[in-house]
Image: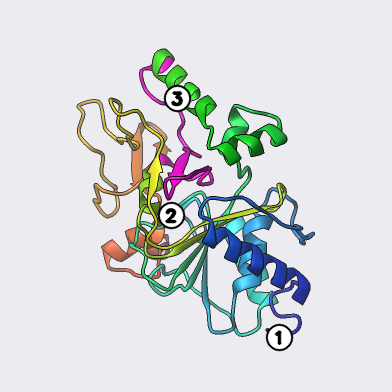
Amino acid sequence: MNQGFGFLDDLAVREIRRGLLKALAIPGYQVPYASREMPVARGFGTGGLQISLAIALPRDRLKVIDQGADDSVNAVALRRFIEASCPGLETTTRTVEATLIQTRHRIPEQPLSPGQVMVYQVPYPDPLQIVEPSESRRRRCHAHGDYARLWVRLYEDMVRFNEVAISNRYPARVAGRYVIDPSPIPRFDVLKLHQSPVAHLFGAGREKKLYAVPPYTDVEPLAFSDVPFAVEPFRDATGARRTCARCGAADTYLDELPQVGAASRWQCNDLDRCAERLGYPGDSDHDEHHAGP
């Protein structure tokens, strides 16, 4: 690599790449690494940012999304920083055009293609953290494949709420071995990890951990045999599946947009996919651009 490309020095890039190779070789295993100081606060995606800067090449095309949007403050700030740090790196808002996609809390609705790489910003890499505060004990549990406390947590939810109450960061078993925290993606996205044709790379800068799901790997959400895993239903009072108010899609993750003096409006969370369905690829703000005075 060229000296200075991607902001990180060569030693940092080499360490992160080696850590990612180990993470890909042992799916779901949390690889420790020396997380570097970045010009953004820890907790604002430094882990994912370091991965992107370490693996980006001048020929890549980058897409950065935050909760499905390309135009949020987080997405725009990180995209501009990576673009300024990587001379020759192109950026895009189109999922189909991107070779490197850094995301916060969503997987694009557009089916991913072989050769693309997903990079996740992860706040807490360990799924056992919600049931075990001690890191040494969590390591021991992972080593022995002991996830009994997670199963108890799921059971307690069933007893109290008649359903699993985990809305995001839903624990999933990778390649039949390690259980991972898939980052705060909604349950709707967890199934997209299963046999995905792309590599999914997870970075937690504050916790100094890397882990990965290689392409075409089995990923199974934890669920009881008599209580199957279920995604967000997005149903109205009549039980009918809600649709996007813009494109009419009934198979996407929706955001509820409250309206003053009217019923809430439901809209696709992935604005790029929504714009593509409407025939305006690459223009997720088409309505605003063409609105009257």
Screen quadrant of the N terminus? bottom right
Dot placed on the residue nearer the N-terminal end, 1 or 2: 1
Q: Which amino acid does label 3 sit on?
A: Leu
Query: Mostly what secondary structure, the magenta segment?
Result: loop
- At 31% from the left and 49% from the top, the residue drawn is 252
- At 26% from the left and 48% from the top, the residue drawn is 251
Q: Name the residue under label 1.
A: 2
Front residue of 182 and 290: 182
User: Which structural element holds mark 3?
Assistant: helix
**Residue 139 picture location, percent across and down:** 65, 39
User: Which structural element holds mark 2?
Assistant: loop
Q: Nearer the viewer, mark 3 or mark 2?
A: 3
Q: Which amino acid does label 2 sit on?
A: Ile
Count numbered badges in the picture. Answer: 3
- Where residue 123 sits, quadrant-wise, is top right
Front residue of 39 and 53: 53
Which numbered disc covers residue 107? Answer: 2
Dot placed on the residue nearer the N-terminal end, 1 or 3: 1
**Residue 45 picture location, percent across and down:** 65, 54
Measure how far apart labels 1 and 2 are at the Cα level. Answer: 31 Å
Q: Mark 3 points at which residue?
A: 154
Q: What stretch is highlighted in magenta?
A: 160-187
